[in-house]
Image (cartoon, helix red, strand yellow):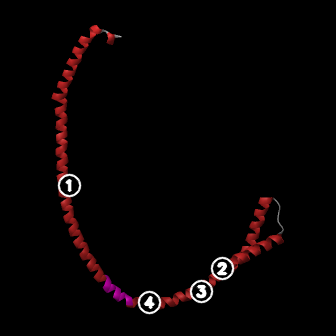
């Protein structure tokens, strides 16, 4: 192995020192000053950005204060206008309420009658649908068609229980 040749140690050490010195001088004279310049430039830009941000923050605070004052004035005006309109329309609303309540009561009575009729019609058809569904389900589950009389009685019993709940 060439690393174990003791005769080559001295030249290798000399070249190591020369290479290290050259790299040290290059880093100290060329690379590190450039890096320092870049860091200083960044530091200055960051400081400028912070100053501008503080200025913008101060301006934003002033604008926000003006906005809040304008908003408070607008709220006061809107409140006054709303109060006046509320009082004006309260009388009109009371008058219209009476008329509408009469119409709504009449419509509610009519709707209740239609609902009762629809419910009675639906309940009448419910038994037939329930019997058909039960017959189909029973036939699919156990493979035997059930007795229509027993099936009708079971459905009637369940409908009676559901109505009592």
Q: Residues within 10 Å of mark 2 (few under 14, many from 20)?
A: few
Q: Residue at x 25, y 75 (%)?
A: 72
Distance, label 3 to label 1, CA atoms, is 69 Å
- Residue 3 lies, in percent from the top left, at 32, 13
Q: Nearer the viewer, mark 1 or mark 4?
A: 1
Q: Residue at x 21, y 23 (%)?
A: 23
- Which badge, 4 or 2, is on the more N-terminal residue? 4
Give the secondary structure at mark 1: helix
Q: Residue at x 33, y 11 (%)?
A: 4
Instruction: State if disc 4 and disc 3 touch (CB < 8 Å).
Output: no
Q: Nearer the viewer, mark 3 or mark 1?
A: 1
Viewer-nearest residue: 137 or 41: 41
Instruction: Name the side, left or right, on which 73 lies relative to 122.
Output: left
In the image, farthest residue toward the top: 7
Give the secondary structure at mark 4: helix
Residue under label 2: 118
Residue 10 is labelled as none
**Residue 83 is covered by the magenta coloring:** yes
Q: Which residues are magenta?
A: 82-90
Residue under label 1: 53
Q: Residues within 10 Å of mark 4 (few under 14, many from 20)?
A: few
- Residue 95 lies, in percent from the top left, at 43, 92
Quadrant of the image containing the N terminus = top left
- Which badge, 1 or 4, is on the more N-terminal residue? 1
Viewer-nearest residue: 136 or 42: 42
- Which badge, 3 or 1, is on the more N-terminal residue? 1
| Residue 66, quarter of picture | bottom left
**Residue 117 is covered by the magenta coloring:** no
Q: Main secondary structure of the magenta part?
A: helix
- Which badge, 3 or 2, is on the more N-terminal residue? 3
Residue 96 is labelled as 4
């Amino acid at each position: 192995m060439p690393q174990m040749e003791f005769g080559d140690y001295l030249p290798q050490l000399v070249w190591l020192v020369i290479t290290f010195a050259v790299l040290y001088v290059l880093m100290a004279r060329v690379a590190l000053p450039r890096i320092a310049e870049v860091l200083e430039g960044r530091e200055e830009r960051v400081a400028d950005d912070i100053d501008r941000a503080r200025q913008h923050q101060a301006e934003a605070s002033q604008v926000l204060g003006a906005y809040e004052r304008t908003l408070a004035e607008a709220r006061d005006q809107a409140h006054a206008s709303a109060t006046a309109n509320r009082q004006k329309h309260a009388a009109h609303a009371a008058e219209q309420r009476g008329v509408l309540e009469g119409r709504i009561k009449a419509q509610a009575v009519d709707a209740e009658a239609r609902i009762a009729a629809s419910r009675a019609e639906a309940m009448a058809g419910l038994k037939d649908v329930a019997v058909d569904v039960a017959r189909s389900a029973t036939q699919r589950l156990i493979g035997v068609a059930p007795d229509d009389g027993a099936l009708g009685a079971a459905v009637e019993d369940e409908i009676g229980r559901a109505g009592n709940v």
